[in-house]
Image: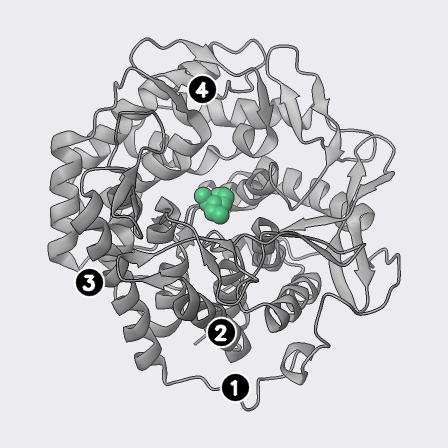
Amino acid sequence: MRPFRSALSRAFLPRRKALHVAGAGTVGLFAPLRSAERGQEPTGVDLPPDAVVAQQVRAELVHSWEGYKKAAWGYDEVRPVSGGHNDFFVPGQSFGLSMVEALDTLWVMELDAEVALAADWIEAHLDPAVDGDVHVFEAVIRLVGGLLSGYLCTGREALLTRCRELADRLLPAFTLSPTGLPYRYVNLRTGKVSGAVAPLAEVGSNILEFGLLSRLTHDARYGDAAKRAYRAVLDRRSSLDLLGSTINVETGKWVDGTSSVPNPPVDSFYEYLWAGAELLGDRDLLDWYRLLTDAVVRRQAEHRSGHLWFRQVDHSSGRTVGREQSELGAFYAGLLGKGGDLSTAQDYYRSWTALLDRYPLLPESIDFGSQKVLSRQNSLRPEYVNSSFDLWRLTGSSLYKATGYRCFQGMRERLRVPGGYTIALDALASPARLGDLTPGYWFAEAPKYLYLMFAGSRRFDHRSGLLSTEGKILRGALRP
Ligand code: DMJ
């Protein structure tokens, strides 16, 4: 495969900065680096032929999908152990979330009868005017993004119409805010907004979906609202070019001034600067990505026992306030690579791979300072495999296929149940202590990244393709 490198990456390749390296310790939590993880091609990794892996991944996606269809059709999420279901947004109300999440994954896997079933349900039943407080960020990345990618993949106009109706009802979160920073919740029927203290990821992770919707509808309101929110945050950066974690959308004051990149609750705020620049060709977003990322790498990167992690610092003083690393932060390796800093990206990926050597199911959270696991849960999260996919596209190296496959095998061996796939409450126990939920994002992310790496799908343009933080294909769908 020819390495993917976007026009923007080529045009603005990095002024690579030396890492500020601090700290030293003994190896405790992590396995020593294997030769494959020191940057060489893997040797002795038991990786079946691509077509075999692609079929395995597709079969596992079908297994989960059938579990959802059997036990929870029409509901947001399935509880695959008990056969129950879960309302994700509003108690007693369903948006058929797993269907919206699955649409483009089913489509790239050429499961066209299933795409039609899901799209028919969505067109007939998804109500964009539910009387309930809906989480704006989750509605944008999952529903608006899912409907957009469903439209791009299938060409079904009704999906775009439903998407626009929903976005119109989400817009008051932005337009009623005195600062332009969006409120967290909006009642889709009444337009009443609530939730004035917003995490950074929620403030910024709208520009892809809203920017693209503006393009497709020739209605600038969506993209303008998202860009105004980004600008409002950038205006409030510290003299160190760092941002806090939560902000009051009415006063514009930081509530938590900790820079916790790449952990939640800030993670995709940074992802959408790069991706927004790439998808929309917006130079401001790229400049902001560079400015903020340079500061993060300079002030937060820390080497411990040969592994690179990112500590938390006060955004005004730069003082270290924590060393927690969330599994959700594993996406950052791919983002750093796409942003042009492949060396730091690969270092960070290797740290996560070393953790995977120790724990075939990655724990939800660790403290790289104390070398302790902070949360033993595994929520079927996609972030490590997301970075495998991104770095494979950038480098063409089979190392990323081998390690991504290893992560998949860990889930397949431990989290597969007769009703699909489930989260683990204790992923480190042997056997893992299982929970009872297939999160909607399972249908959107990990199986799709793996399939696209191994299948060479006829329906995805690997050179130009662009996926959202929720794995939605927003560019590069190749309609037959
Ligand atoms: C997904 O909903 C998205 O990737 C989001 O950006 C944060 N992470 C979850 C899954 O872990």
Cα distance between the residues tagged 1 and 3: 29 Å
Q: Nearer the viewer, residue 311 or 274?
A: 311
Q: Decide which of tag 3 and tag 4 comes sooner along the chain.
A: 3
Element type at mark 4: strand
**Residue identified by numbered label 2:** 406
Q: Position of residue 252 (x, y in %)?
A: 66, 15
Q: Which residue is mark 3?
A: 110
Mark 1 = which residue? Answer: 45
Q: Residues within 10 Å of mark 3 (few under 14, many from 20)?
A: some
Which of marks 3 and 2 precedes in the sequence? 3
Callouts 1 and 2 close, C-beta under 8 Å: yes
- The answer to whether 27 appears left or right of 100 in the picture is right
Query: Residue flagged by tag 1: what amino acid is it?
Result: Val
Sequence-first tag of 1 and 3: 1
- Nearest the viewer among 107 and 447 is 447
Give me the C-alpha separation between circle 2 and circle 4. 38 Å
N-terminal of the two: label 2 or label 4? Answer: 4
Q: Compared with residue 344, is residue 242 higher up or lower down, i.e. above or below?
A: above
- Cβ at disc 3 under 8 Å from ligand 1: no
Mark 3 → mark 4, Cα distance in angstroms = 36 Å
Q: Secondary structure at mark 3?
A: loop
Going by the numbered disc 4, the residue's amino acid type is Tyr
Which callout, 2 or 3, points to the residue nearer the camera?
2
- Residue hosting label 4: 185
Q: Are marks 2 and 3 in contact (CB under 8 Å)?
A: no
Q: Which mark is residue 69?
A: none
Q: Which mark sits nearer the N-terminus, 4 or 1?
A: 1
User: Where is residue 293 shown, x and y percent of the image?
Assistant: 70, 46
